[in-house]
Amino acid sequence: MLGIWATPLEQGLAYAVLVLGVYLTFRILDYPDLTVDGSFPLGAAIAATAITRGIDPLVATLMGFLGGAIAGAFTGLLHTKLKISGLLAGILTMTGLYSVNLRVMGGRSNVPLLREDTLVTLAQARFGFAWGAIILFVAFVLLIKLLLDYFLHTEVGLALRACGDNEKMIRALGVDTDLYKIFGLALSNGLVGMAGSLIAQYQAFADVGMGIGTVVAGLASVILGEALLKPKTIMSATLSAIVGSILYRFTITLALRAGFAATDLRLVTAVLVIVALSVPKIKELPFFKKTVQEKESTQNKKVYNQQASVLMGSEKHASD
Amino acid sequence: MLVIEKLNKTFELGGGTTKRAIKDLDFQAQKGDFVTIVGSNGAGKSTLLNLVAGVYSPDSGKIFINGIDITDLPEHKRAKFIGRVFQDPMMGTASTMTLEENLAMALKRGQKRNLKLGVKGNRDKFRNTLSKLDLGLEDRLTDQVRLLSGGQRQSLTLMMATLNAPPVLLLDEHTAALDPKTASCIIDMTKEIVVDNELTVLMVTHNLQQALEVGNRTIMMHDGEIVLDLFGKEREDTSVDTLLEEFSKVKKERFLDDRALLA
C-alpha cells in the first residue's frame, strides 16, 4: 500500500530515535557532538552480538542504549573535566569506539542476524509483514518523544536546557553544569545507541562502518524538520525532529529515484546541511540584501500595477 | 551576615607580570546592610563580588555567610546563599526558555532538583511575584524571555535572584546598561525587595549620586583595598563632590580622567 515509501518511512521512524538524540546535543545543549558516529554502530554491535548469544531482543536494545550512554558520558568527561574542546572530545571517543565496536563484534566487521528473532521479526509476526516494523518503530519513537517532552519540563530537564542556553546563569542558581553536560551527552548518545540497536535489527546485521556520516544525517534531519514546522515549544521541536527524520529519508529516496548513485548520497546530505546552515548568513550579505529589496520593490510595483489595471479595468467597465 | 577576612587575590597577567587585585581585605556587613561600592576601573570591585560568588577562588583569606565558611565551596554550591544580578540584562536569564520556566529554575536555587514538573503548581506564585513589578509580565508567563526588553529582563533577573530570599545579594552595576527611567525603576524595586527580605546587599555602581542615595553604607575601593567606609551621619553629610575629592586624594594622578568618567 505504501509502495516505495514503506522503506524510507520505516527507516525514518527508526532513525528518529537517533535524531532526537542529535537534537538533544545540538539544540538543547548547544554542543556539536561527534560521538554519534561511534555510538550508533556501538549500539548496533552490542544489540546484534547480544541477540546472537540468545539474549532477549528488547533487553539487547536497552543494552544498546546503555552502551551509547557510556560512550556519551566518556565524551562529557573529556570535555568538562579534562577541558578538551567539544568537537575534539567527540572525535576522540568516536575514533576509539571503532576499535571497541570491532571487539564487541568479536573481531568481525559484520554480525548478521538473519536467522535470529529480533524486535522487527517479532513485530512482523504479530502485526503482519507490511506493518510490523512501522508499528514497532512508531511505538518506540512516540514513547521516547513523550518521555523526553516530560523530562525536559522537569526541574532537572529545565536546568539541562539552561546549561545550553545560559551556562553562567544556571551555575549561579546552584547547578553543577559539568555534571549536567555529562548527563545530557549520556542521554543523547544512549538514544543514538538505541537507534543503532533498532537499525541493526531492522536491516538484520550490524556493520562496523554503519556509523560514518550519521551525525551529519541526523543534523540534516533536525534542520529539515525545523524548516518545515518552525517549532516554538519543546513538544513541537521533538515532533519536528521526528518529521525531519522521515522527510530526510524521503529526500534520499527521491535523490536515488532522480538518478543519484547510492555512493553520492553523503555528498548530497553534506550539501543539504551546508545550504541550510548558510542560508541565514547569505541573506545577510549586502549583495543579497539589495537584490531581495529590489525584488520586493519590483514585486510591489507589479502588484500596484495589477491593482491599478484592475481599478482602471473596472472603471472602464463601469463607464461602459 | 557577610564576613570577609584577610582576603587576597592576585591575577597572572602573562609575561611574568601579576596584578594584586585584592589586598588583605577585611570587611563585615550585617543582615539588612545595603552596601554600595564605588571606585575607579581596576579598583577590585567586581573581583570582590566574584570572589564572594565563587567565580574565582582567593589565594588566601576566608569568607563567611551567616557563620558558614564558604571559602572553599565551588560556585554552584554557594548558590543557595547568594543571589546575583549582572550588568548585562542578557546574562541573568535563559532567553529561549519561558518566563515561568526561568522562575521555576530560580525557585530551586541551591536545592536538589527532581524529576518533578518544574512549573506546574507554582504558576500562582509566579504570577503574584511578577505582578509586584507592575510591568504586566504576569500575563506573559509562557512567553520566551528573548521577547522581553532589556529592562524587563533585568526586572525578571532581580525577581529570580531574590525569589527565595538568599541571605546575600550581589549587584554588579545592574542598572548601568539601562535607560535612566528603567534604571530608577529597577533601583526602586531593589530597595523594596531588600527591605522586605532583610538581605545583605553589595551593589557596585559607577553612579556616585546613586551610591550615596541608595542603601545605608558606601565603601570606596582603590587598588584592591577599601579606602573609605561611610555610614550613618558621616554618610548623610557626604556629597558627590566630597566623594570625588576623596577619589582625587587616593588617586591624584588620574583625577581628571576619573572625573570625566564618573561625573
Image (tube, coloured by chain):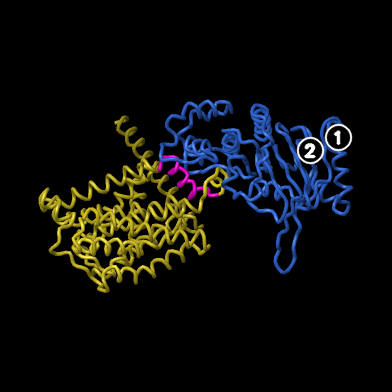
Chain colours: A yellow, B blue
Residue B197 seen: yes
Using the image, name the chain to which the residue with label 1 belongs.
B
Task: Answer above or below: position of B73 versus B200.
Answer: below
Residue A304 seen: no
Query: Is residue B175 left or right of B77 when viewed as pictured?
Result: right
- C-beta proximity under 8 Å, tags 2 and 1: yes
Q: Secondary structure at mark 1?
A: loop
Query: Is residue B248 left or right of B182 when viewed as pictured?
Result: right
N-terminal of the pair, mark 2 or mark 1, is 2
User: What crowding class fits label 1: few (fewer than 14 Cα within 10 Å), some (14-19), or many (20 or more)?
Assistant: few
Q: Position of residue A40 (x, y in %)?
A: 31, 61
What span is colored magenta in the figure? A152-167
Mark 2 or mark 1, whichever is nearer to me: 2
Q: Verify whether residue A299 appears in magenta.
A: no
Q: Secondary structure at mark 2?
A: strand
Question: Which of the 4 image quadrants contains residue A265?
Answer: bottom left
Name the disc covering residue B218, or none.
2
Query: Is residue A70 left or right of B88 when viewed as pictured?
Result: left
Q: Verify whether residue A160 appears in magenta.
A: yes
| Residue ID for mark 1 | B238
The span from disc 2 to disc 1 (Cα, nearest Å) is 10 Å
User: What crowding class fits label 2: few (fewer than 14 Cα within 10 Å), some (14-19), or many (20 or more)?
Assistant: many
Quadrant location of the C terminus of chain A?
A: top left
Main secondary structure type of the part rendered in magenta: helix
Q: Amino acid at mark 1?
A: Thr
